[in-house]
Image: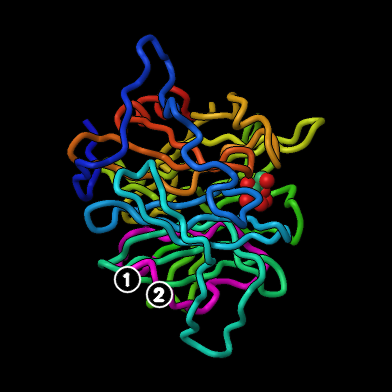
Amino acid sequence: MVKIIGKALPHLPWQEKPVGSTETIWRYQQNPIIGRHAIPTSHTISNSAAVPFKDGFAGVFRCDNRTGYSELHAGFSEDGIHWKIAPEKIRFVFANPQTEDSDTQYDPRVCEIDGRYYVTWCNDYHGPTIGVAVTDDFHTFTQLENALLPSNRNGVFFPRKINGNYMMLSRPSDWGHTPFGDIFLSQSPDLEYWGRHRHVMGRTAGWQSTKIGPGPVPIETTAGWLMLYHGVVTTCNGFVYSFGAALLDLDQPWKVIVRTKAYLFTPETDYETSGLVPNVVFPCAALADSATGRLAIYYGCADTRVGLCFGEVNEVIAYLEHHRL
Ligand code: BMA
């Protein structure tokens, strides 16, 4: 049996798999958990991240407003399902005054490292790149240096140092709706200077033939780092975003142990297949309970709303082995 290495989360949001379901990942039946107008100024609320915080949960939400800009808003929840999202966007305090503010900030991830919460997101600095901020309370956020040069999206930290370095996954991109993309890993002694870049894995065929990118913060297990990732295929009507999983080596996480040939989860419901950008499921956070092996995954639905789905780590790994690429 594979074990999750990490905290027990007895308050993890959870709903049992529907009787008779053959899915490895199943949807929360009351989805979506956050609608497009959850705050007065929002046009859509989608790809967003949650973490356990104090006795409940905190999160950073991608709220697109009526100007068409994407902004990051903080939020809190007691149960991980019902959220109070701040109507005002996060006003970052800059650690270095030379750092520039950006009009567009999207697809946040939140990673707890040594008791502090690091937010990474797609920032704009003469093109898309990886913004980084740190918070202790989800009220004051200190923005650090952008991690990489443009163009890059989907910066995702690992929750601890590995062999003395912090690690980050990312997906180099272009300025537009990038028609390519592989997952890379970068290393840093201090969360500011990133190097020792390694290719982790590339797009292949089928649902992951156009591009792939890292999703939630990787989950440490006894079998390796469990990485959920999005995969994109180009159809005659545009991109379709699904997600799959891979296991990465615990000590050298640029080495792939196994990855899925078949997707784990793809847009199927109305709230995933219609909206601002139809046919998108985009996972940005996964909570993992080490006591039970349960996973609760937050994902953007059609770039319009936020959904929640569930799985169990041993079933995900069994699926990976069964559908290995
Ligand atoms: C990507 C990002 C994501 C979005 C996806 C589908 O380029 O903008 O935020 O979910 O496209 O529109």
Q: Nearer the viewer, mark 2 or mark 1?
A: 2
The secondary structure making up most of the magenta span is loop
Which residue shows up at 50% across the image and 83% down it?
A: 94
As drawn, 165 above or below 171: below
Res 148 quadrant in image: bottom right
Res 173 quadrant in image: bottom right
Residue at numbered disc 1: 136
Which residue shows up at 68% across the image and 37% down it?
A: 275
Q: Which residue lies most toward the bottom here?
A: 97
Determine the CA span between mark 2 and mark 1: 7 Å
Comparing 88 with 146, the one in front is: 88
For the residue carrying disc 2, how many other residues have a C-alpha within 10 Å: few (<14), some (14-19), or many (20+)? some
Which residue shows up at 46% across the image and 38% down it?
A: 33
Residue 97 at x, y = what percent?
54, 90
Residue 215 at x, y = what percent?
49, 48
Q: Which mark is residue 140?
A: 2
